[in-house]
Image: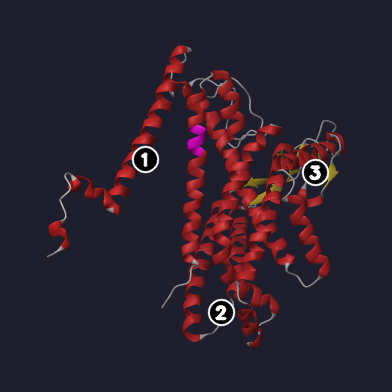
Amino acid sequence: MAVQDVLPSRKGSSGFSALNDQRVRGAIFQVLLIVAIVSFAWWIIHNTAANLRAQGIGFGFGILRDSAGFQINQTLIDYQETSSYVRVYFVGLLNTLLVSFIGVILATIIGFIVGISRLSKNWVVARAAYVYIEVLRNIPLLLQIFIWYFAVLRLLPAKRDAIDLGPFGLLNIAGWYAPSPVLGRGFALVVAALVIGIVATFVLRAWARRRQMATGEIFPLFRVALALIVGLPLIAYFVAGFTFANPPFSLEYPTPGNFGPRGGLRVFPEFIGLLMALSFYTASFIAEIVRAGILAVPNGQTEASYSLGLRPGHTLRLVVIPQAMRVIIPPLTSQYLNLTKNSSLAVAIAYPDLVSVFAGTALNQTGRAVEFILITMATYLTISLVTSLFMNWYNRSVALVER
């Protein structure tokens, strides 16, 4: 006789038997979690709406069409005091994107140089890279921004005593007066030649890779790419010059004056200070990421390349770095995101970024904190997601392909 036959049956045991199923319990807990999150969000929204009504503050985005009424000294698009708050938003957004984009490029270049130097067999070079990393990454970024702005740029000579940088323009306390580009007829032809050169380089690169995989022969891609990207626009430049009887592209150099330099392209010290601080600070972290990525490549790869006759430079560029990129890219993405978000510290030196002019000056004038903060948060979230998507795509493109 089976044991189940002699044991008394439990009333209602079938109703609780489903709780013993791990999948059922998991589904119940997830439903409870969603209910808790939605309830908390509803409470936040309801409480905010009640507080706004109590203070007599409305909610809506129609105020963005109102005139801002204040001036912004650094703009990439046309802006006047009578422009709307929407215009203020785009001015701040473009300034944020500009300093972030250039900062990412500079930080990557400096970080790779310092990271590779950290592994140099030259004791002085390796120690100098080590000191750079340890000093810069352990000093708060806000303090570094103050150092660049107040201790470096604000101590430059007065406007009439600008430092002559030769072909790079003039430098004084009001900023850097760089040579300004002057576009002439035929410039579109030069741009078209540059685009054709870049596209042809990518096509040639894919062909050269397939050819190398099939035959083992290395195509001199660098020299050909240099000829396409530099030589082709140069030919278009001279052709356009002869055709239209004037150069399609020239530079206007600033000239010194009693009230400051005249002409040229003025780069404000707030932009320079923020860019330098962001670039050097982030580069100290990127350098350690690069060093870790190179060390993650087995030493046997280097020895094998040496045995094939490759020189150290070619070994680093063709063997070590491509494999190290698979380790470098994920943490590198985080540093790019951090640099973009850290650019909001620009408000400390009055650089007109998104936080300074839109979530700062415009918010204080209107008192619409909820709308302006929501827009600012959504903007930074969008920038971060787009950056992550691009870096994830690049990470997949350099990942190992199993055959």
Left or right of residue 15, residue 128 in this image: right
Tag shown at residue 170: 3
Secondary structure state at the residue bearing disc 3: strand
Identify the residue position indicated by label 1 in the image.
33
Is 215 placed above or below 112 here? below
Foreground mark, 2 or 1, reads 1
Three-letter amino acid code at disc 1?
A: Leu
Give the residue drawn at x 45%, y 12%: 54
* Mark 3: amino acid: Leu
> At label 2, which amino acid type do we have?
Phe
**Picture coordinates of residue 374 (x, y %)?**
48, 31
Please say if 47 is above or below 29: above
**Residue 228 in the image, given as x and y percentages of width and height:** 57, 67
Instruction: Give the class, few, some or many, for how many residues have Cα within 10 Å of label 3's Cα (few <14, many ≥20).
Output: many
Q: CA distance from mark 2 to mark 1?
A: 58 Å
**Residue labelled with disc 2:** 219
Nearer the observer: mark 3 or 2; the answer is 2
Q: What is the span of residues highlighted in magenta in the rendered image?
A: 375-379
Q: Residues within 10 Å of mark 1 (few under 14, many from 20)?
A: few
The CA span between labels 1 and 3 is 61 Å
Q: Main secondary structure of the magenta part?
A: helix
The front one of 381 and 102 is 381
